């Protein structure tokens, strides 16, 4: 059916949710709902939720809670909880959010349209958390894109079979399933035709892409994407250390569009904790992979995820993690305090760590990493780097006061995923230009276009 009105979509969580929200926007668009960024205008509100940590889950409930009052004044407003919390809570979501109309699980996207029809024709409170063997396939609707049309996420697989003991993903996103290579290539070709220059291929463990389905391997998929005209940069996330193959390392080394950056979540530097997390590798094996990677790709930037305060983590275990940061010198890290998830087995492990203790470990870790991020950024000073121009930058850098008023402060990213601010008056968003790096800040670089 076709309706008319506005859709407001709130996205919480990871890059995959950003991608999924665009798919939801496209479905709503095809049902006549135009996307709006003005919540007050909305006739349908979708909260695409994340349950990876307690805080993200609370954010979803508190966002949706705000609509109790609004719905009283605007009874036709449809409220939807989509994504991981929806999948996890199912029917129970109505108890916490009584004014909620639809609970749309992670594998229910293909049924979203008919569900809206049912609500419109008077049905109340619909839950769909059924599994689907196939991933929802629909070509992107470029009219629903967020402002950034230069860089896009493309989900290549869903779910996870690894069952790390702290993680909800296998429980809310289901078993691992890969999309067909032809569908991925068609989608990226369409993105390129719409002006997209950079794609980030997404999966919980991209290294095992296509293995179950006996399709092409991930390095081969990268090679096929590398051949798509108009795409200049390829990124991917996330790699699992236990499956980081030498073929993938060679693909990063040899394929010109694949960026020299790898996000390789280590989670902990302690073998005891890695074992309890069911990660499938040791600290030594992780370091061995990094050494191989650095041998083949000496300039590669590295980032990682770390969880502190996993059940039974002692100060000794934590120190192993601190020492791993010193040993590897990551360019950046994402660090989290362990958050108990009732569907994940670690919730039932003994020796849970006190919240204040977790906070202290997290602060220590972040403080240590700040030093290495700063060090890596300072190492860029004097280099001339290729920067993909993403747009005008909001916050002006100190150095900007000293340049002519006719300039704009622009922002872009290096291959290594470092943010660069620079003054210019004539660069085009989406171009890759050479920037001479002159200054380093804790989270970004500053420079001038070469020759300027
Ligand atoms: N608590 C804290 N952090 C978690 N992550 C996953 N599950 C949890 C949890 N229960 C982190 C991991 C993962 C990242 C996406 O989120 O570090 O790599
Ligand atoms: Fe979760 Fe582990 Fe799968 Fe990553 S690999 S999604 S941490 S179960």
Image (spheres, rainbow, N blue to C red):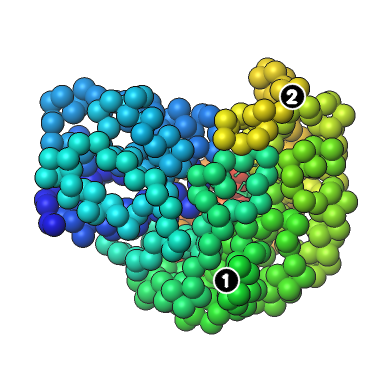
Please state the horizontal and vertical placement of residue 88, each as a whole percent of the image: 46, 38
Residue sitting at x 40%, y 32%:
60
Residue occupied by mark 2: 350
Mark 1 secondary-structure assignment: loop
Please state the horizontal and vertical placement of residue 382, each as a whole percent of the image: 70, 59
Residue sitting at x 44%, y 63%:
134
- Mark 1, other Cα within 10 Å: few <14 / some 14–19 / many ≥20: few
Residue occupied by mark 1: 213
Residue sitting at x 67%, y 44%:
164
Please state the horizontal and vertical placement of residue 102, each as a whole percent of the image: 28, 40
> Between 110 and 61, which is closer to the camera in this rendering?
110
Taking the image as shown, residue 98 lies to the left or right of residue 270, namely left
Q: CA distance from mark 2 to mark 1?
A: 38 Å
> Between 435 and 230, which is closer to the camera in this rendering?
230
- Mark 2, other Cα within 10 Å: few <14 / some 14–19 / many ≥20: few
Above or below for 57 versus 252: above
């Amino acid at each position: 059916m076709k309706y008319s009105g506005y859709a407001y979509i709130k996205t919480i969580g990871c890059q995959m949710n950003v991608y999924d929200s665009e798919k939801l926007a496209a479905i709503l668009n095809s049902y006549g709902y135009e996307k709006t960024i003005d919540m007050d205008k909305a006739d349908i509100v979708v909260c695409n939720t994340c349950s990876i940590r307690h805080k993200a889950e609370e954010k979803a409930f508190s966002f949706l809670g705000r609509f109790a009052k609004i719905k009283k004044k605007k009874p036709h407003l449809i409220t939807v909880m989509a994504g991981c919390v929806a999948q996890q809570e199912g029917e129970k979501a109505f108890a916490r959010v009584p004014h909620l109309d639809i609970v749309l699980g992670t594998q229910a996207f293909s049924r979203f349209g008919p569900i809206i029809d049912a609500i419109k024709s008077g049905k109340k409170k619909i839950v769909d958390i059924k599994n689907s063997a196939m991933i929802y396939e629909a070509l992107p609707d470029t009219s629903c894109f967020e402002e950034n049309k230069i860089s896009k996420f493309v989900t290549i697989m869903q779910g996870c079979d690894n069952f790390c003991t702290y993680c909800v993903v296998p429980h809310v996103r289901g078993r691992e399933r890969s999309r067909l290579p032809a569908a991925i290539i068609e989608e990226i070709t369409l993105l390129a035709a719409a002006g997209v220059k950079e794609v980030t291929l997404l999966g919980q463990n991209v290294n095992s892409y296509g293995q179950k389905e006996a399709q092409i391997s991930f390095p081969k998929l990268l090679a096929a994407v590398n051949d798509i005209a108009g795409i200049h940069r390829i990124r991917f996330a996330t790699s699992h250390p236990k499956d980081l193959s030498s073929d993938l390392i060679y693909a990063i080394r040899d394929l010109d569009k694949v960026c020299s950056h790898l996000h390789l979540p280590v989670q902990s530097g302690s073998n005891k904790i890695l074992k309890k997390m069911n990660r499938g590798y040791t600290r030594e094996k992780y370091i061995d992979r990094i050494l191989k990677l650095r041998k083949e790709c000496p300039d590669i930037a590295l980032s990682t995820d770390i969880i502190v305060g996993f059940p039974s983590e002692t100060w000794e275990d934590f120190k192993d993690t601190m020492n791993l940061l010193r040993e590897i010198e990551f360019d950046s890290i994402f660090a989290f305090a362990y958050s108990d998830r009732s569907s994940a087995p670690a919730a039932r492990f003994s020796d849970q760590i006190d919240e204040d203790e977790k906070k202290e470990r997290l602060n220590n870790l972040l403080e240590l990493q700040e030093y290495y991020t700063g060090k890596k950024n300072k190492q860029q000073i004097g280099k001339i780097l290729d920067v993909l121009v993403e747009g005008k930058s909001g916050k002006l850098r100190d150095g900007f006061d000293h340049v002519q008023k006719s300039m704009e402060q622009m922002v872009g990213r290096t291959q290594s995923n470092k943010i660069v601010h620079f003054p210019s008056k004539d660069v085009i968003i989406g171009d890759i230009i050479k920037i001479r790096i002159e200054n380093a800040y804790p989270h970004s670089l500053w420079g001038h276009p070469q020759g300027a």
